[in-house]
Amino acid sequence: METGETAIKDTTANPAPLGLMGFGMTTVLLNLHNAGLIALSSMILAMGLCYGGAAQVIAGIMEWKKKNTFGTLAFTSYGFFWISLVVLLVLPKLGWAAAADKASMGAYLMLWGFFTFFMFFGTLRANNALVTVFGSLTILFWLLAAGDLTGSETFTRVAGWEGIFTGLSAMYLGVAQVLNESYGRVVLPIGPRG
């Protein structure tokens, strides 16, 4: 009697565009605020919880199913980043905790910058668009941290504009993946690498 293995073909959808769009759109909105163009309102907080947060966590779980360790770590981590950022802003308003001071927020953002910097090295064998997202995100976190640690509004404003670029680059990659897959050809280039 022969024993054999049965290969199961993965026919699930690519979760990366969901995560990229959740990250990108939420990043653009928050950084419109950081650039001084819009107020921090419930619109940004809701986007942070629902699309930047929950949708990215879902995308990360879907990446786990596809055995993509990088995607799992990135999407779940940044999803929970957005959720934690909203919680940091809301808890003091509810009277449940003291507001984080500038030094604490600077440390929080600096740590996320280091995490992103290390993740950036994981993109160096991926496409150019992903390298751009993680490279610009590293800079964004460090500019925001510098703004909090120094009290300089200039750092925060520059970070806002840089963050708009970061968010748009993630949105571009998400849309490119969808369109390139839908049309079966390169509609929006993302560039080979590695």
Image (cartoon, rainbow, N blue to C red):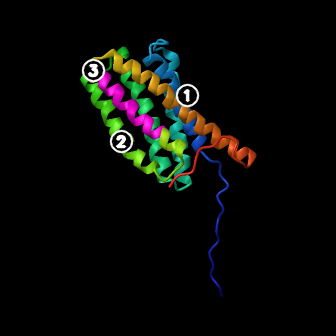
The amino acid sitting under disc 1 is Met
Are the residues tagged 1 and 2 within 8 Å (C-beta)? no
Look at the numbered disc 1 and give the secondary structure of its residue.
Answer: helix
Q: Is residue 43 above or below residue 138?
A: above
Give the magenta range. 133-148
Q: Is residue 109 magenta?
A: no
The type of residue carrying mark 3 is Lys
Residue 142 in the magenta stretch? The answer is yes
Q: Is residue 152 above or below residue 126?
A: above
Q: Which mark is residue 115?
A: 2
Main SS, magenta region, reads: helix
| Nearest the eye: 21 or 140 | 140
Residue positioned 37% across, 42% down in the render? 117
Looking at the rendered image, the quarter that the N terminus falls into is bottom right
Q: Helix or strand or loop: what does disc 2 sit on?
A: helix
Residue in the image at 42% along x and 45% along y: 120
Which residue in the protein does label 3 denote?
Answer: 102
The numbered mark at residue 25 is 1
SS state under label 3: helix
Which of the two labelled residues, at mark 1 and mark 2, occupies the earlier sequence position? Answer: 1
Q: Earlier in the sequence, mark 1 or mark 3?
A: 1
Q: Report the disc number at residue 49.
A: none
* Spatial separation of the CA atoms under disc 1 and disc 3: 25 Å
Q: Along the horizontal axis of the image, is 124 left or right of 16?
A: left
Report crowding for label 1: few under 14, some 14 to 19, many 20 or more residues within 10 A (C-alpha). Answer: many
Circle 2: residue type: Phe
Query: In the figure, is residue 63 to the left or right of 119?
Result: right
Earlier residue among tags 3 and 2: 3
Question: Spatial distance from mark 3 to mark 2, Cα to Cα?
Answer: 20 Å
Cβ atoms at labels 3 and 2 below 8 Å apart: no
Q: Which x, y percent locates residue 27?
A: 49, 27
Residue situated furthest right in the rendering: 183
